[in-house]
């Protein structure tokens, strides 16, 4: 996809994620919106996946380590063709399988059930190690929240990834600076993330997480490393990206919009979509 088509697809995904959270009256919209540009480029331009055969042994793997942002993943998978978009209407519904945290047993395309922060990257390390042991050429991607990097398990996984020379692993950090209780700096400072990962013997890349061309290029750069080191991409993003009143507001970490707020958000995104398609 070119830049325009990526922007159109990401905007449709934002509308779908917003609809899911509003319909369920619960869910994590802020961090979903900040991650959707990165997921769109990854699933539509980079990852080797087949929606008609989601368990293909040769596929690239993706682990949503910040598993509470499942609206972003489900919306992306639906638009990529893994399942009908209509299935998203049952998000967090007892009648459906789209649980609030990423769910692998009933949702095609989800490679790992996640939700407990810090555990997703650990599973991704295991997947990448399995690929090395089995001499497979698939790549493993995992998306973390920046607040998630306060978890000690993240750094245990980082140590293991370096020890086992997992250059088939790419961690992506959604650095929007906010978490449920406020800013990262207020809760528990995490910076400098680049220096920390360098000290753990990782390749470190940085990118504007809302620049489609830059994202496309940085994924290529990450895949080009063949130096026995895992790679981390630190993305600078805006929490709530695409909905002006949600942007940079930690209050939208895990809150659903009411009917009036939903209508405002939909109007804003649809106007942008119309501009893109026009």
Image (cartoon, rainbow, N blue to C red):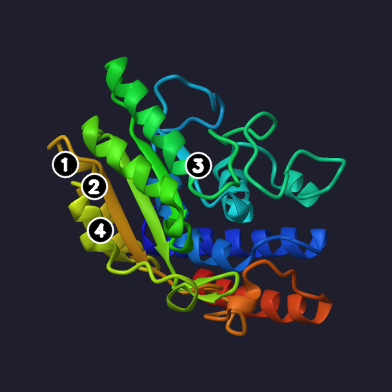
Q: Secondary structure at mark 2?
A: helix
Within 10 Å of the Cα at label 4, are there few (<14), some (14-19), or many (20+) other Cα atoms? Answer: some
Q: Secondary structure at mark 1?
A: loop
For the question of whether residue 46 can be seen, the reply is: no
For the question of whether residue 274 can be seen, the reply is: yes
Q: Position of residue 31 (x, y in %)?
A: 55, 64
Which labelled disc corresponds to residue 196?
4
Within 10 Å of the Cα at label 3, are there few (<14), some (14-19), or many (20+) other Cα atoms? Answer: many
N-term mark: 2 or 4: 4
Q: Report if the CB atoms under discs 2 and 1 are less than 8 Å apart.
A: yes
N-term mark: 4 or 3: 3
Which residue has dot 3 on it? Answer: 119
Q: Position of residue 141 (x, y in %)?
A: 39, 42
Which residue has dot 1 on it? Answer: 225
Q: Image quarter for residue 54? A: top right
- How far is the residue under mark 3 from the one under mark 2? 22 Å
- How far is the residue under mark 4 from the one under mark 3? 19 Å
Which residue has dot 2 on it? Answer: 222
Q: Report if the CB atoms under discs 3 and 2 are less than 8 Å apart.
A: no
Q: Residue at x 58, y 46 (%)?
A: 116
């Amino acid at each position: 996809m070119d830049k325009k088509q990526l922007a159109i697809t990401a905007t449709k995904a934002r509308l779908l994620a917003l609809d899911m959270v509003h319909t369920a009256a619960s869910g994590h919209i802020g961090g979903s919106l900040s991650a959707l540009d990165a997921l769109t480029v990854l699933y539509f331009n980079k990852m080797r996946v087949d929606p008609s055969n989601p368990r293909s042994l040769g596929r690239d793997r993706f682990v949503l380590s910040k598993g509470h942002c499942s609206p972003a993943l489900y919306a992306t998978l639906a638009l990529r063709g893994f399942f009908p978009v209509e299935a998203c209407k049952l998000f967090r519904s007892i009648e459906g399988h789209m649980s609030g945290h990423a769910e692998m047993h009933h949702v095609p395309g989800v490679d790992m059930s996640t939700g407990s922060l810090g555990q997703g990257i650990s599973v991704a390390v295991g997947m990448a190690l399995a690929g090395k042991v089995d001499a497979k050429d698939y790549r493993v991607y995992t998306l973390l929240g920046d607040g998630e990097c306060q978890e000690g398990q993240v750094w245990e996984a980082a140590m293991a990834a370096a020890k086992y020379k997992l250059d088939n692993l790419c961690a992506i950090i959604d650095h929007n600076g906010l978490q449920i209780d406020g800013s990262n700096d207020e809760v528990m400072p995490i910076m400098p993330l680049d220096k920390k990962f360098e000290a753990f013997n990782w390749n470190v890349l940085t990118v504007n997480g809302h620049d489609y061309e830059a994202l496309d290029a940085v994924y290529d750069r990450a895949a080009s490393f063949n130096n026995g080191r895992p790679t981390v991409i630190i993305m600078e993003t805006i929490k709530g990206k695409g909905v002006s009143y949600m942007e940079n507001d930690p209050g939208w970490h895990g809150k659903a919009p009411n009917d009036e707020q939903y209508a405002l958000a939909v109007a804003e995104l649809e106007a942008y979509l119309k501009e893109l398609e026009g």
